[in-house]
Image: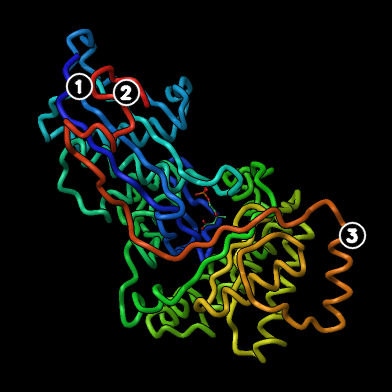
Amino acid sequence: MKLERVVTCTAPVNIAVIKYWGKRNEPLILPTNSSLSGTLNQKDLKTITTAAGFKNENNTTGEVELILYLNGKLDANSQENQRLKNVLREMTKAASSQQSQFNTIIVVSENNFPTAAGLASSASGYCCLVYTLAKLYQLDWSNEQLSIIARQGSGSACRSMFGNWCKWEMGQLEDGSDSKAVPCVSGKSDAFAQEMEILICVVSDQKKHTASTDGMRNSIKTSSLMKERIEKVVPERMIQMEEAIANADYQTFSELCMKDSNDFHAVCRDTTPPIHYLNETSFAIMDLVDFYNKVLCKGQNGVAYTYDAGPNAVLYIHGKEHKQKFAKLLQQVFEISGNTTLEPIDLNEEWKIKATELKEKKHNQLKNWIETTLGAGPQIVSTDLSDQTNHLIHLQTFVPK
Ligand code: PMV
């Protein structure tokens, strides 16, 4: 087996501020609405993937053999994973005009997320796989084109192809060729991304109890709110959200962000059987954000929450000062260790009582938080065949490190 080329890349996690919920075509993963997300900084959260291409005389099948290691384990199920197979088929198709010199590829992929982050890894994982294979094959495809393939692994993966703010345009075509990610770069959007601070409040690190594909299917079948969301609410909100980002208008951004999260979870509750992704701690964080904005900031919002298919809150915060203050508040109310040195914040009577109640409930508590910012899209780390440090496999023995 002769190593011909090796590439290592990284890709970010993204968190939607206008949620994707619903597929109009399940195999192709075509959504029922467009969505918009912020891209988290890879300094704190990322997937890293190495792809090594070999000329292997023992492979006489005429097909490309793929050996996949995910988070330190050989992924024996990769043949049964239809989405992974779809992505690999599309990548092989894309590379077919490329006179590829490989017939065996080893892929090693790992997440650097803190184990207790409770974050879904499929978005950064599929984005990184597609991006790394494209660089291995030396395809001159744009990230927009690659997002169409990443989408077929996990819908939200397409939005990890760009930094800062990214929109997934739902598209209209049946073959999905116009359902792709595009960066949101108009007006002051980049400056607005720089101002943003992110706190991920980890309430649970358990796997979500209703898989998103099943939940989406049931919402489409049974929720009347879903119909309203798809046809009216999201199309209007997408325009308003893009405008708010382009104008660096945090007040409008924060209102839309929280409203969309609330609407999405209302659709979940309106589904039969109802889907409950949030728990008491999630609701307490929502109330605390509300108290912070309304009482402490007198209606000039400084914090916005959003929740995906689980109880963890992701907070989009307007600048460092608000982040410090809100972290202090979380620390006071949930009694967890934090690194803020601020003086305790004055809680009103209602919150003094609430904080005591929350402390008495030992279950459902806030476990920790992760601080980050927004950041860049996928990056190439190394394509150097003699690089001994950056690739995830040993280049002499071809085993994962
Ligand atoms: O891409 P999936 O199948 O993991 O779906 C993600 C759906 C939400 O996270 C709930 C919303 C979103 O837009 O990311």
209 on left or right of 25? right
Coloring scheme of the render? rainbow
Q: Secondary structure at mark 2?
A: strand
* Res 14 seen here: yes
Q: Is residue 36 visible?
A: no
Q: Which mark is in front, 1 or 3?
A: 3
Q: Earlier in the sequence, mark 1 or mark 3?
A: 1
> Does ligand 1 reach within 8 Å of label 1's beta carbon?
no
Apparent side of residue 228 relative to residue 23 in the rendered image (left or right) = right
Using the image as rendered, state which of residue 82 and residue 72 is in the foreground. Answer: 72
Q: Amino acid at mark 2?
A: Leu
Q: Residue at x 37, y 59 (%)?
A: 172
Which of the pair 300/166 is nearer the observer? 300
Q: Which residue is mark 3?
A: 360
Q: Position of residue 302 (x, y in %)?
A: 58, 81
Task: Look at 49% across and 58% down and name the residue there.
Answer: 32
Give me the disc on residue 66: 2
